[in-house]
Amino acid sequence: MDANFTLPYSQFAVADLFIQTFKTKDGYSVLVPVSGTEQGIDLVLTRRADGNTRALTFQIQCSRSYCGTEGKRKRKRYQHLRWLNRFDVPEQADFVVLFGLYPPDDQSGVSLSKSHVMVFSNADMATLIAGVGTGSGIGFGFNSADQAYLTGGTESGEHVDYAAHLFERQIAVIRAALGETASMLFQRKRRC
């Protein structure tokens, strides 16, 4: 009998995104725990340099996406909305990744769903969750892939810009957490 190993699509997609971004030639490895009992960790990113290995752990939360609807003022505020139920931030995870798929724009000619990926440090996510009312969840709205506005879960109801947490803008934070300095990044870019 062959053993089967299954991986939720959200974990596969984030692992693939990490593999494309953090290259093996630069000392990075992406690991997926195979134990179903490994609580709070869905992905591990390591970096080997000078005989030492550093590791970061990631929890991946997948959210539903919805098409934006007209608000009370009869105008659509955001083209896409994502919603996550309230969850406990695992202490085992250094970072929490929020992954969501959304339908492409009608004008793009692309028929496949696109991904919207946000990365929060454990402390940042714990602060965000702590500000969410009991029984509530977190909502993000956006019109394009480079936007993320907190639309649900706040007591004030204000739409707060969270674009700084988009994956593309957190790459340097992740690299720094694994000990890569700005000068190392500059040297690598010169080689390419």
Image: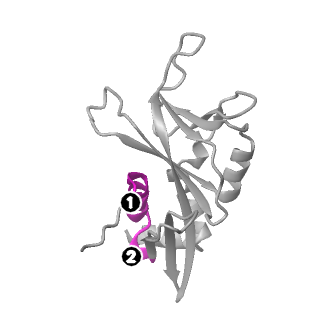
Q: Residue furthest front?
A: 1
The quadrant the N terminus occupies is bottom left
Q: In the depicted view, which residue is nearer to us: 4 or 179?
A: 4
Q: In the depicted view, which residue is nearer to us: 180 or 106?
A: 106
Give the structural element (helix, strand or loop) at label 2.
Answer: helix
Mark number displayed over residue 46:
none
* Horizontal side, residue 133 vs residue 116: left or right: right
* Amino acid on which disc 2 is placed: Lys
> Distance from label 1 to label 2 (Cα)?
25 Å
Magenta stretch containing residue 9, yes or no? yes
Magenta stretch bounds: 8-27
Q: Is residue 162 above or below residue 23?
A: above
Identify the residue at horizontal 56%, vertical 74% (top origin). 55
Residue 171: x and y in percent read: 53, 59
Q: Is residue 70 above or below residue 189?
A: above
Q: Nearer the viewer, mark 1 or mark 2?
A: 1
The residue identified by callout 2 is 25
Mark number displayed over residue 7:
1
Magenta stretch containing residue 85, yes or no? no
